[in-house]
Image: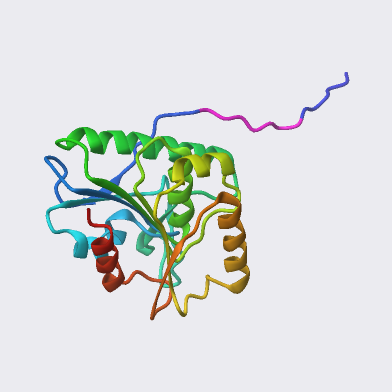
Amino acid sequence: MNHSRTEARLNNLTVPRTARYATLGPVDGAVDQVWFVFHGYGQLAHDFVAPFRVLDDGSRLIVAPEGLSRFYVENPNGGPQHQPVGASWMTREGRTSEIDDYVRYLDLLYQDVCTRLDGEPTSVHLLGFSQGAATASRWAVYGTGRVDRLILWAGLIPPDLDAARARSRLGGVPFVVVAGNSDPYITQEAWAEHAASCERLGLEPELIGFDGAHRLSKMVLSDLAGAGAA
């Protein structure tokens, strides 16, 4: 008897997920600004949000979503029970689905946050750090939430954004790029690609540098908060 064998096929199934996020500031009532801040690769929301306490003056709500994929960060000093845990927004595997998933997740989060507030905030700011810069950019372009300023920190705009949607969603929106002067990930090649992407999308970023590497700066955060005040 001749038994033919078929190739294995990958299939997709959309399922409910439990996502988590960290907040600073009032989660209900009236606020002037809402900041959505996106962590980098291998970070967790409750750790990442800590430096943003400098913005927590009672008039701002800071929301730090956490990537949907958590994993053990390699630790040479012990087994999994001793390894720190980090999160990622996406990998190259199932890339399109992962982007779609987190855009839907962030849209739902935006709706949930806004329904708790007493009226519309004066402004909504998106800040993405490192891998979170691509996440913030994609949500700004493909999501449905309001965007009054986009800040990319230690990360650059993705080169594959849809130009028409980017121009529609981000046209006239202040766009800021922050990088430390010794950040090893902001190479000349990466910067050239970023500049080409910005030109294609019609974006003109304000560039802010500081003395440091691949990290947040509370001083620059404070300056950004002052510049973004309504």
Question: What residue is rendered at 71% in x and 32% in y?
Answer: 8
Q: Which region of the structure is painted magenta?
A: 7-13
Q: Where residue 118 sits: x, y (%)? A: 14, 36
The question of residue 10 being in magenta is answered with yes
The question of residue 77 being in magenta is answered with no
Q: Can residue 149 be seen in this view?
A: yes
Q: Quadrant of the N terminus?
A: top right
In the visual, does 136 lie left or right of 229? right
Q: Where residue 7 sits: x, y (%)? A: 76, 31
Name the foreground residue: 50 vs 143.
Answer: 143
Q: Where residue 36 sits: x, y (%)? A: 32, 50
Question: What residue is rendered at 36% in x and 38% in y?
Answer: 145
- Choose top left, top right, bottom left or bottom right for residue 191: bottom right
Question: What residue is rendered at 14% in x and 40% in y?
Answer: 28
Overall secondary structure of the magenta section: loop
Task: Farthest residue to the top: give it.
Answer: 1
Q: Is residue 162 visible?
A: no
Question: What residue is rendered at 43% in x and 57% in y?
Answer: 72
In the visual, does 28 lie left or right of 16? left
Name the foreground residue: 41 vs 79.
Answer: 41
